[in-house]
C-alpha cells in the first residue's frame, strides 16, 4: 500500500508540472493564478496521500493548505480591482463577454 | 498472487480514479483555448480528483479523528476552490488585461 | 517508490525556485514563489517535520502570497517600471556560496541524528510531549523570546514608514467588497473554521505537531480575510487594545521567564510547573503573533480620501 500511495503522490506531482507550465506561459494573469490554485489543490492531495505513509499529522498540513491556498488568489482579485482594495463583483464587466 | 484486503483494493481504485481526474484537469488547463474554459476545466476536475483521493485515503484511516480531518480537508478545498474560481473569473471578466 | 517521489518533488521544488528568480515579470515570479512554498511544505511533510510543514504551509503558501501580490499591484499602480527580475552575477555567486557552505557543514556535522536523542532524553523534564515545542519554548526559550520581539520590531519598522499626518488613520488601504457578494460570503464562511483550526493547533502543540506560531498564523490569515471583505473595522496604530494584543506575547513570555529566577534562573522552567508556564506563554504568544502578522500584511496606516 505504501508503494502505491507514494506512486499516486508522485503522479499528482507530475501533473502539477503541467500547472507550472501554465504559470510560466500565462498568457493572462488569471491563467497564472488559477494554475497556482491547482498546485495548491494538488499539494493538498499529496499531503493526504502521504498521511498513511509518513504521519497522520500530515492531515493537519492538508487542512492548513486547503484553508489558506485560496488566500493568494483572494489577494490577486483584490489587487486587480481599480483601487486595489475592492472586489471584482463591484465593477461592471468590460467590453463584451467573449473569452479570448 | 497474494490476497489484498478489500479496503486496500478500494483505496487503489479510488485514488487511481482521482489521479485520472487530476490528469484531466491538467490537460484541460494546458489544452483549452481561452482563460474561462481553462478555469472551468480546472475547478471541476481537480476537486472531484481530490474527493476521490480523500475517499481512498479515508479507507486507510485508523481513527475517527483522522476521518473527520479528511472530510474537513475536502469540504474546505471544495468551498475555497469554488469561491476563488468565481472571483478570478469575475476579475478576468471585468478586466480584459487579466485574460490571455 | 520513495526515490521516485523524492526525485519528482525535488525537481518541482527546483523548477519553482528557478522560475521565481530566473524569469521576467514580477507577477509571474510571485506566483512561482507561492507554488514554491507549497512544494517546500510537502518536502517537510516527506521528511516527517510536520511542525515546520505547518508553518511553511501557513506562511509560505498563505500569507506571503497575499503580501507579495498586493505589493506587485501597488508598484504597478504607482507606475513603477516592470523591471526584469533577474539575479545579478554577484548576488547569484553569493547565494550559491552560502548554499554550498551550508550543505558542506550539514554533511560534516557528526551524528546524523541531530539532537533528537538529547531532546528525547530531556523531554520528560520539559512539561510537554512534543519535542519541537519542548525545544522552542523550554530548552531554547531564549531564541523564541527574541524572535517574538523581532516580529514586533518588524511591525514598528513598517509603521515607521507612515507620515506624521497619516498616523491618525487606520492601518492598511480602505478595504471594501460588494455586500452579499462571493468575497463577503467567503469571509463569513472561512473564519469560524479557521479559528477552530488555529486554536486546535496551539492546544495540540504541547503533544503533537502545532504550536503558537502555526496557530497564530492561521488566526491571522482568517482575520485578514474578514478584513479584506471589509467586514471588520481596521484598527488605528494608537489603539490601546491592539497595542496590548501586540505586546502581550513577548511581555508575558518575559514575565514568566523572569519568574523562573525565583525557581532557579531566567527562563528556567522547573518540571512540575513547566506545562502550565509553557501553555500560558503559548496562549499570549499566539494572540500577539496573530495580531502582528495580520497588521504586517495590512501595512502602515493610510489616510482615507473623502469621496
Image (cartoon, coloured by chain):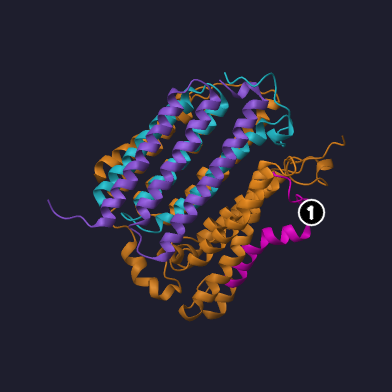
Chain colours: A cyan, B purple, C orange
Q: Residue at x 41, y 58 (%)?
A: A57
Above or below, comparing residue C12 to residue A46 in the picture: above
Left or right of B74 on screen, residue B97: right
Query: Residue C113, how many percent across, how many down?
Result: 29, 58
**Quadrant in the picture for residue C247:** bottom right
Q: Which residues are magenta?
A: C229-257
**Quadrant in the picture for residue C282:** bottom right
Q: Secondary structure at mark 1?
A: loop
Above or below, comparing residue C92 to residue B72 in the picture: above
Left or right of C243 on screen, residue C190: left
Left or right of C163 on screen, residue B75: left
Left or right of B7 on screen, residue B73: right
**Quadrant in the picture for residue C174:** top right
Above or below, comparing residue B67 to residue B80 in the picture: below
Q: Main secondary structure of the magenta part?
A: helix
Examine the structure image and report whether residue A16 is included in the region drawn in magenta.
no
Q: Residue at x 76, y 52 (%)?
A: C235
Q: Is the residue marked by circle 1 packed among few (<14), some (14-19), or many (20+) residues within 10 Å?
A: few
Q: Quadrant of the C terminus of chain A?
A: top right
Between C33 and A91, the residue placed more toward the observer is: A91
Query: Residue C18, how many percent across, how many down?
Result: 42, 30
Query: Residue B89, how many percent across, how many down?
Result: 60, 31
Amino acid at each position: 500500500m505504501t508503494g502505491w500511495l507514494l506512486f499516486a503522490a508522485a503522479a499528482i506531482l507530475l501533473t502539477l508540472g503541467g500547472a507550472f507550465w501554465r504559470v510560466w506561459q500565462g498568457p493572462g494573469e488569471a491563467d497564472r493564478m488559477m494554475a497556482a490554485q491547482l498546485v495548491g489543490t494538488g499539494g493538498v492531495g499529496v499531503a493526504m496521500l502521504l498521511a498513511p505513509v509518513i504521519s497522520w499529522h500530515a492531515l493537519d498540513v492538508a487542512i492548513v493548505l486547503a484553508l489558506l491556498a485560496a488566500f493568494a488568489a483572494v489577494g490577486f482579485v483584490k489587487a486587480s480591482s481599480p483601487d486595489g482594495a475592492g472586489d471584482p463583483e463591484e465593477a461592471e464587466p468590460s467590453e463584451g463577454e467573449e473569452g479570448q | 498472487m497474494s490476497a489484498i484486503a478489500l479496503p486496500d483494493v478500494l483505496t487503489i481504485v479510488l485514488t487511481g480514479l482521482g489521479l485520472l481526474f487530476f490528469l484531466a484537469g491538467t490537460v484541460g488547463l494546458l489544452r483549452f483555448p481561452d482563460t474561462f474554459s481553462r478555469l472551468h476545466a480546472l475547478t471541476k476536475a481537480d476537486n472531484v480528483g481530490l474527493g476521490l483521493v480523500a475517499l481512498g485515503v479515508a479507507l486507510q484511516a485508523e481513527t475517527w479523528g483522522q476521518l473527520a480531518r479528511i472530510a474537513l480537508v475536502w469540504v474546505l478545498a471544495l468551498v475555497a476552490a469554488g469561491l476563488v474560481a468565481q472571483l478570478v473569473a469575475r476579475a478576468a471578466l471585468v478586466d480584459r488585461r487579466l485574460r490571455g | 517508490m520513495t526515490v521516485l517521489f523524492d526525485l519528482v518533488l525535488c525537481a518541482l521544488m527546483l523548477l519553482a525556485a528557478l522560475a521565481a528568480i530566473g524569469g521576467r515579470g514580477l507577477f509571474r515570479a510571485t506566483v512561482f514563489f507561492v507554488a514554491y512554498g507549497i512544494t517546500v511544505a510537502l518536502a517537510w511533510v516527506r521528511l516527517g517535520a510536520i511542525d515546520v510543514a505547518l508553518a511553511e504551509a501557513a506562511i509560505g503558501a498563505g500569507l506571503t502570497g497575499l503580501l507579495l501580490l498586493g505589493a506587485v499591484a501597488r508598484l504597478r499602480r504607482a507606475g513603477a517600471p516592470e523591471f526584469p527580475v533577474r539575479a545579478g552575477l554577484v548576488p547569484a555567486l553569493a547565494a550559491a556560496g552560502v548554499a554550498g557552505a551550508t550543505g558542506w557543514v550539514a554533511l560534516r556535522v557528526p551524528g546524523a541524528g541531530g539532537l533528537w536523542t538529547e531532546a528525547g532524553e530531556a523531554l520528560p523534564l520539559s512539561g510537554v510531549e512534543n519535542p519541537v515545542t519542548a525545544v522552542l519554548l523550554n530548552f531554547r526559550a531564549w531564541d523564541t523570546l527574541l524572535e517574538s520581539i523581532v516580529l514586533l520590531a518588524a511591525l514598528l519598522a513598517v509603521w515607521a514608514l507612515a507620515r506624521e499626518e497619516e498616523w491618525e488613520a487606520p492601518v492598511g488601504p480602505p478595504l471594501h467588497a460588494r455586500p452579499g457578494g462571493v468575497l463577503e460570503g467567503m469571509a463569513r464562511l472561512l473564519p469560524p473554521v479557521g479559528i477552530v483550526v488555529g486554536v486546535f493547533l496551539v492546544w495540540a502543540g504541547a503533544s503533537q505537531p502545532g504550536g503558537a506560531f502555526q496557530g497564530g498564523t492561521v488566526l491571522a490569515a482568517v482575520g485578514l480575510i474578514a478584513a479584506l471583505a471589509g467586514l471588520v473595522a481596521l484598527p488605528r496604530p494608537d489603539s490601546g487594545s491592539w497595542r496590548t494584543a501586540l505586546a502581550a506575547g513577548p511581555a508575558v513570555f518575559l514575565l514568566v521567564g523572569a519568574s523562573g529566577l525565583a525557581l532557579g534562573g531566567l527562563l528556567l522552567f522547573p518540571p512540575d510547573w513547566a506545562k502550565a508556564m509553557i501553555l500560558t506563554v503559548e496562549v499570549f504568544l499566539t494572540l500577539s503573533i496573530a495580531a502582528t502578522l495580520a497588521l504586517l500584511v495590512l501595512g502602515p496606516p493610510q489616510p482615507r480620501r473623502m469621496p
